[in-house]
Amino acid sequence: MTSEPDGDLLDPEGRAMLRSAASALSTHVDERWVEVADALVSRALTTSRPSPPVRASATSGPVLVTEQVLVSHLRASMDPFPECETVAITIETDGDSCTGAVIALAVRFGTELIPLADRVRAVVEDQLGQLLGPVVPPVTVSSVHVHVDDVTRGDPKLDVHD
């Protein structure tokens, strides 16, 4: 049994074919790459943008929580609602304290909107209370606005596009 030096198992013709294949693969560009690249850059810009701070109360004193953290928690708290998908969340402030929120939803056709909006408001009020502590004046269901931005016949969680 003989072995090739340095573990090279290809003959010169095989190495030439391998180099040719690698070269062809390295120059291949999918025609839709431009579309994908734009979508990736757009997504990266929206997820890594700086976020303004919002004042919160902790047992040790005031702290700051970024708006992006609040939005992420609110979005996650509404994920269990099968009849809607969160399209956008805006945290309203008076400069540094939270005064309310605007929640934009895509909703499945036939969903009763008033009960859904009431549930969304209650969840948002609860989550902001947990995340920010006591806010003066308090964030209540009257300062949480729910908007229906889209109505879909199918599953809103699958039909909504960023």
Image (cartoon, rainbow, N blue to C red):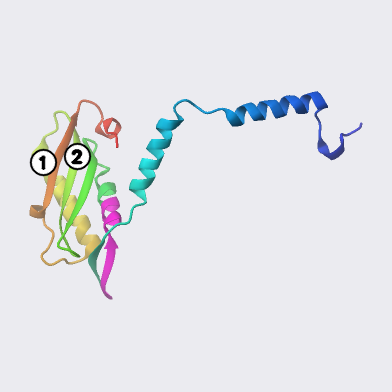
Label 1 neighbour load within 10 Å: few <14, some 14-19, many 20+: few
| Residue 71 part of the magenta segment | yes
In percent of width and height, residue 72 lies at: 30, 51
* Residue lying at 29% horizontally and 37% vertically, measured from the top left: 162
Q: Quadrant of the N terminus?
A: top right
Q: How many marks?
A: 2
* Residue lying at 11% horizontally and 57% vertically, measured from the top left: 140
* Residue lying at 80% horizontally and 29% vertically, measured from the top left: 10
Quick one: which residue is furthest to the right in this view?
A: 1
Q: Is residue 69 left or right of residue 122?
A: right
Dot label at residue 156: none
Dot label at residue 115: 1
Sequence order check, earlier mark of 1 and 2:
2
Secondary element at image label 1: helix
Q: Is residue 117 left or right of residue 76?
A: left
- Mark 1 and mark 2: span between their CA atoms? 14 Å
The magenta-colored residue range is: 59-73
Circle 2 residue: 105
Is 125 placed above or below 118 here? below
Q: Is residue 50 left or right of residue 146?
A: right
* Residue lying at 10% horizontally and 54% vertically, measured from the top left: 143
In percent of width and height, residue 27 lies at: 59, 29
Going by the numbered disc 1, the residue's amino acid type is Pro
